[in-house]
Image (spheres, rainbow, N blue to C red):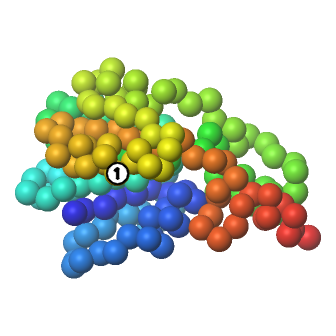
Amino acid sequence: AIITNGAGNYTAFVHRYTQYKGHHSQLATTSGTMGYGLPAAIGGQLAAPERKVVCYAGDGCFLMNGQELATAVRYNLPIVIIVVNNGMYGTIRMHQERNYPGRVSGTKLQNPDFAAYARSFGANGETVLKTADFASIFDAALNADRPTVIELKIDPEAITPTATLSEIRNNSA
C-alpha cells in the first residue's frame, strides 16, 4: 500500500505503528504542511493504480483540502481516507498546554459530519465510534471501487502515543 498523511499530532500514531514493506510506500509532507494527505493520495493512486492507497488526515488537516474529494470521485479512485477527528488543532493545543497551561485559544474546531460530507460528493462515508468496529469498515473500504472516508471519533485527551493533554498540562513548568 501507499500511505499518505499531512501534518499534525495524529501522524505520530501513523509513523509509530505502521510497518512499511519496501520503498515508495509513504507520501508525507516534510515541511509540516496541513492538507497534504488527500492530494498526495490522489496523486499516488493515479501514479500507481494497481496499489491500495490509504490517506491519514487529522480533522483540521482534512478541512484544508477536503474539497479534493470531488477529484477522487470524478476519477473513481478507490482511495481510503481516515479522518482522525479529535475536534481541535491538536499540535497547537499541545504546545499551548505545554507552554501556557490551561490558556487555550483558537484550537477548537466546529467539524462537519465527515462521513455525510463524503457521501455528498458520491464517495462512501463511515464513522467509527468504537475500536472494535474499525477492522470490518476498513476492510470494506480497501475493497471498495470508489473513495471512502472513515471518520474516527477520537478522545481529545489522546494527543500523542505517550502522553495525554492532561499529562502535558500537569507536567508543564
Nearer the observer, 141 or 78: 141
The amino acid type, in three-letter code, at marker 1 is: Ala
Image location (x, y in percent) of residue 147: 24, 38
Residue 42 as seen in the image, left or right of residue 155: left
Residue 136 in the image: above or below residue 33: above
- Residue 118 location, quadrant: top left
Q: Is residue 64 visible?
A: no
Residue lying farthest to the left in this orientation: 50
Q: Is residue 171 visible?
A: yes
- Residue 51 location, quadrant: bottom left
Image location (x, y in percent) of residue 146: 18, 36
Residue 80 as seen in the image, left or right of residue 12: left
Residue 74 as seen in the image, left or right of residue 168: left
Q: Please give the name of the residue rendered at 62% of the width and 64% of the height, measured from the top-left corner.
A: 160
Residue 11 as seen in the image, left or right of residue 40: right
Q: Please give the name of the residue rendered at 38% of the width and 70% of the height, measured from the top-left corner.
A: 18
Residue lying farthest to the front in this orientation: 132
Image location (x, y in percent) of residue 31: 48, 65
Residue lying farthest to the right in this orientation: 173
Which residue has dot 1 on it?
Answer: 135
